[in-house]
Amino acid sequence: MGKLKVPPSLDPKTGVQSKDVVISHKENISARLYLPSSTANSARKLPLLVYFHGGGFCVESAFSPVYHNYVNSLVAMANVVAVSVEYRLAPEHPLPIAYKDSWTTLKWVASHFDGNSSEEWLKRYADPTRVFFSGDSAGANIAHHMALKVGTEGLAGFKLNGIVLVHPFFWGTELSGAELKMPPIVRLYMAGLWRFLNPLSSGTDDPLFNPIKDPKLRDLGCQKVLVFVAEKDSLYDRGRYYSMALRRSGWKGVVKVWKTKEENHVFHLLQPTNEKAVAMMKRIVLFFN
């Protein structure tokens, strides 16, 4: 994963088309849209996926090869229309700017379902009653917070059915499980990284970083949540704690956890043909359909 960006294309293997759109010239917010080949022969509208890329809020892009290839494959397998969000990065644009950019993009997406916006792919092919958010690492963090914002503030125009959080980038001051055995430098790194990303934050128990501390957790604006955790990932326990806290919060939906043994953080992006990565992809496709 690096800084290289690839152009949108018509993928010869999957038939998936992609193109880039500008959400805000002023704030430099954009997105890459994906359309599966099935739309050529069907009038039926498809589920809509909004994807938030990872990279610790400070690297990577919706246009980088690893994310372009991943979302392209996911669109082909799940038969969904997708919007991959290009939000601004820290430290040049410290948090909470990434969240603000993501919400701006969601409002732009929702505007297409009242007949007043111009992006044909969304108006013609996306089903506003079947919307999903997903992301990995920092992107999973964003996906959660966007779903929470949908639940607390509302977003007219579409119905959020569920979210998929892959190896979510959450943390906190209270440690348990495998975290208790981590070298102190890992805990210091997490706290320092968060301060670097969000200089005005209250610390690692900021609800943006530790959603377990958020009194509004029960207001998550969807019906189902799928959380992926990897056994060798330093964030492994955080995904589990989040799932347990969500169940206890009074939220009315269903949350499930998928554990991958003997794998590390975002292994599925680095080794997409890995047997376990393929199994993850199939589980996500089932979730969307």
Image (spheres, rainbow, N blue to C red):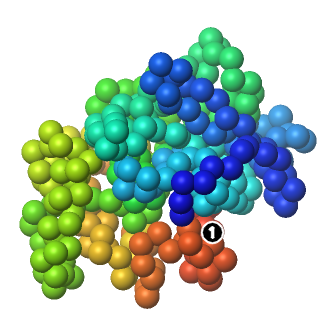
The picture places residue 145, in percent across and down from the top left corner, at 33, 43
Residue 67 coordinates in the image, percent (x, y): 59, 56
Where on the picture, by quarter, is residue 155? top left
Residue 245 falls in image quadrant: bottom left
Which image quarter is the C terminus in? bottom right
In the picture shown, does residue 60 fall above or below 113? below
Label 1 element class:
helix
Residue at 57 percent of width and 43 percent of height: 84
- Name the kind of residue labelled 1 in the image: Lys
The residue carrying mark 1 is: 282
Residue 47: x and y, percent? 64, 43
Residue 59, x across and y down, in percent: 44, 53
Q: Nearer the viewer, residue 171 or 225?
A: 171
User: In the drawing, does residue 237 fall left or right of residue 119?
Assistant: left
Q: Can I make out residue 70 in this image?
A: yes
Residue at (50, 30) in percent of width and height: 29
277 left or right, relative to 202: right
At a point 44% along the width and 63% down the height, the residue shown is: 166
Considering the image in quadrants, where does the N terminus appear?
bottom right
The residue that appears at 28% across and 40% down in the rendered structure is: 95
Residue at the farthest top position: 116
Q: Decide which of 195, 229 is in the foreground and name it.
A: 195
Q: How many marks?
A: 1
Is 9 left, or right, of 252 in this rendering? Answer: right
